[in-house]
Image (cartoon, rainbow, N blue to C red):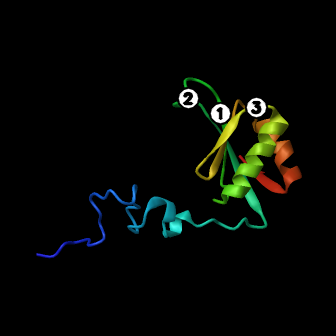
Amino acid sequence: MTRPDPVRLVYSTGVGRVCATCGWPSDQCKCSSKAEEKVPSKVVVKLRLEKKGRGGKMVTVLGGLPGNSDFLEGLAKDLKKALGTGGSVVGATIELQGEWRERLRVLLPSKNLSVKG
C-alpha cells in the first residue's frame, strides 16, 4: 500500500513549524503564496465600513490592494498619521479605526490611488 502524500511530515523536533504545502520550514517556505506582488501602475482601492465582530466599533477597510507588504505598511503608516487614528494591515487589506470613507476619498487620489466604493 502506498502513501498518498510522501512529503507530509507528522512530527519533527529539528525544524519547528513546517509548511503544509511544500514541506519546508515555515521561515524558509518556497511556496508561491509568500511571493510579493508587484505594485501595479494603477491601484483601485475599495472602501467599505465594517462593524461585525468588533464589539460594535466601526472600522474602515481598504481592500483591493496588492499583496506587497512594504507598500501596505507604508500606505497604512501614512494614512494613520494623516487621519490621526489607529489601524493595522491584515492580509492584503488595511483596517483603520473609525469611519473615514469621506476623508479617504479626498486623501487617496493625492497618493495616485483610485477610489471605488
**x then y, percent, for residue 31:** 48, 68
Q: Residues within 10 Å of mark 3 (few under 14, many from 20)?
A: few
- Which disc is residue 59 wearing? 1
Q: Is residue 94 left or right of residue 22?
A: right
Q: Tell me which amino acid carries mark 2.
A: Arg
Q: Which numbered disc flags the more N-terminal residue, 2 or 3?
A: 2
Of 83 and 70, which appears nearest the observer?
Answer: 70
Q: Mark 1: few, some, or many residues within 10 Å (few <14, many ≥20)?
A: many
Residue at the image position 67 percent from the left and 60 percent from the top: 68
Viewer-nearest of discs 1 and 3: 3
Disc 2 to disc 1: CB gap under 8 Å? yes
Answer with mark 1 or mark 3, whichever residue precedes in sequence.
1
Marks 1 and 3 close (CB-CB < 8 Å):
no
At 77% from the left and 38% from the top, the residue drawn is 80
Position of the N terminus, as image quadrant, is: bottom left
Q: Secondary structure at mark 3?
A: loop
Q: Amino acid at mark 3?
A: Thr
Q: Which residue is mark 2?
A: 54
The residue sitting at 81% across, 35% down in the picture is 83
Looking at the picture, which amino acid does disc 1 mark?
Answer: Val
Residue for badge 3: 85
